[in-house]
Image (spheres, rainbow, N blue to C red):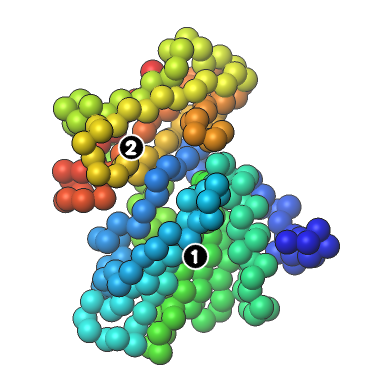
Amino acid sequence: MAEKSLKAFKQRYEFDRWFNVNRLDEALFVRHYFVADELVRGFELIRASSAGAPGQPPAMTSLWRDAGGDTDQLLRIDFSESDSRAAAHGALLQVLGQFESPNIKRQVTSEIGDVAFGADDTAVVVSARANLVIFLASVGRTPVDVQEVAAQLDRALTERPAQPEAMIAAAAPRRFSARFEHGIESVVSGARATIQVAVDEELEEPPMLRFFSRGGEVFAEGEHVIFESDESEDNDVTVYALERQGPPQARSYACRVD
């Protein structure tokens, strides 16, 4: 995007008001995101394909149809994964720059995402949560209200499971682990510490990883996952993993980083 256009879009969408804003009580970072089928209630996946360019952060575009047989109800869900929340907000501005309609406005009262934009007819929602940008649109002849689907995806992304201790215990037999490269002692105020994650090599694809942190932020630098502590003396990072295949209860587990 040209510098002049970028400046214009920043003013139009009030970029400085929401850039790098976190609306959660803790920090969140996501790796290997995917849209779980059970979260898009009433729809079934038709196709999904990678949309990311080589060397760029992962991105996916997908098309869903009404599970009840109404072929005129179609839902498009796209997402892109950035290295940090700030980078995701920059990516969101790029997406907003592709809209020609003046009806796409910031949804100030919406609880979806750290920031969300949409149209008055509820046919389009594009939001940024943590380091993700998620786009939903009704693309069939019969309009679909995408607000509820967007809210479902956002809740699943941001809510910690009700029984974290059981999930942490379940991680052991799966050989899932996460630790600071030089131990918890390396996490001092204002310092950076690399997080090493090990996952069972027998898995066909890596699970989605959600890093919840207090006392600092998790982000990526290339292939490395980094935790940068703030001035708080109480640092805590927990990783929740979700495999793509199988019942949710059997493919979910967690690990505290130490």
Q: Is residue 46 visible?
A: yes
The amino acid type found where label 1 is placed reads: Phe
In the displayed structure, would residue 157 be above or below residue 44? above
Q: Position of residue 205 (x, y in %)?
A: 29, 44
Q: What SS does tag 2 mark? A: strand
Which residue is pictured at 70% across the width and 64% down the height? 13
Count residues near mark 2 (Cα–Cα under 10 Å), then give few for <14, some for 14-19, many for 20+. Answer: many
**Few, some or many C-alpha atoms within 10 Å of disc 1 (few <14, some 14-19, many ≥20)?**
many
Q: Which quadrant of the structure image shows residue 86?
A: top right
Q: What is the number of callouts on the image?
A: 2
Q: Quadrant of the C terminus?
A: top left
Image check: 40 left or right of 80?
left
User: How far across and how far down the image is residue 207, in percent?
Assistant: 31, 42
Residue at the extreme front of the image, as rendered = 54
Task: For residue 22, say whether it is visible.
Answer: no
Q: Which residue is mark 2?
A: 240
Residue at x 57%, y 56% (from the top left corner):
115
Relative placement, left or right, of 202 versus 35 is: left
The residue where tag 1 is placed is 135
Q: Residue at x 18, y 45 (%)?
A: 249
Q: Residue at x 62, y 52 (%)?
A: 89
Q: CA distance from mark 1 to mark 2?
A: 23 Å
User: Callout 2, which amino acid?
Assistant: Tyr
> Which of these two is toward me, 245 or 108?
245
Residue 108: x and y, percent? 60, 62
